Amino acid sequence: MLWTAFVLGLAGSFHCIGMCGPIAFILPIDKSSVTKTIYQTFLYHFGRLLSYAIIGILFGFLGKGLYLAGFQQRLSILMGILMIVTVLIPITIFNKFNFSKPLYKLIGKLKQNLGLYLNKKSNKAIFTIGFLNGFLPCGLVYMALIGAISTGNSLQGGIYMAIFGLGTVPMMSGAILLGNFINVSIRNKIQKIIPIFVIIIGLLFILRGLGLGIPYISPPNAKLQLSSNPATCVTIDKN
């Protein structure tokens, strides 16, 4: 299911331009030569992908704990449902709970550091901007993290988030190199389609958890389960 991370990142990158675009537009890239421009753009993306991967490892570890607690393939179903419900529930309801409030001070410090590095023109500054950018709160990233949890594995969670980041690279690179190159009305129309992609991915996670025996989409239950019994593990490997 790692490919769903790329699809989510690619489809959601129009949302990224709206959220992270202002940072990309004023990124202190040295455009005196094509080589420097490409290299520093790479550094920015590498910083973002690294922070995504770190977060993915942490949430993948959380998913592993849920697997070992006995959720097994049901975790994939739960995460799929959560992904769909999150899209369907009006954002105004989430705003009432204000989940990000406990993190306001940390987010404020993060933005302050971003502001400092945006005034510096160096390779280190470009990388750091990308790295800090990856930790900024974003609804799309939260969706990807649900996918990282469903992997039930720290390494897989990190890879899932890194692949998600790769999906955002083409559009964000366009924002860096060309500025606000997409008409706002077109971007808004595309953003309305993003929830549909999220729902489709949520349904795929539910199918995966059901273990219907469909290759690549819904593998048999045995391949989705973890076992503490060595004999059972050997049997699964042979199948």
Image: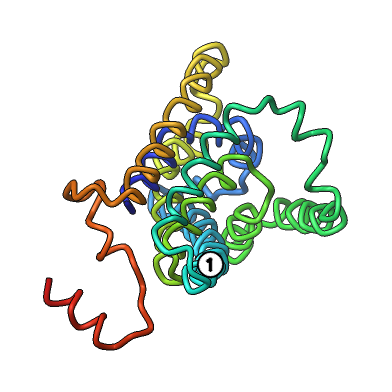
Against 91, residue 27 (above or below) is below
Q: Is residue 128 left or right of residue 219?
A: right
Report the front residue among 100 and 35: 100
Viewer-closest of 34 and 14: 14
Foreground: 122 or 205? 205
Q: Quadrant of residue 21?
A: top right
Query: What amino acid is at disc 1?
Result: Leu
Q: Is residue 216 above or below residue 16?
A: below
Q: Residue placed at 61% from the left, 30% from the top?
A: 18
User: Is 123 above or below relative to 195?
Assistant: below
Find residue 214 and report its horizontal and vertical position in percent.
18, 46
Label 1 secondary element: helix
Residue 9 in picture, x, y percent from top left? 44, 42
Q: Which residue is mark 1?
A: 66
Q: Which of the two residues, 129 or 200, is positioned nearer the viewer here?
A: 200
Question: Which residue sits at x=48%, y=35%?
Answer: 13
Q: Position of residue 130 (x, y in %)?
A: 58, 55
How dense is the environment of label 1, judged by Cα within 10 Å: few (below 14), some, or many (20 and up)? some
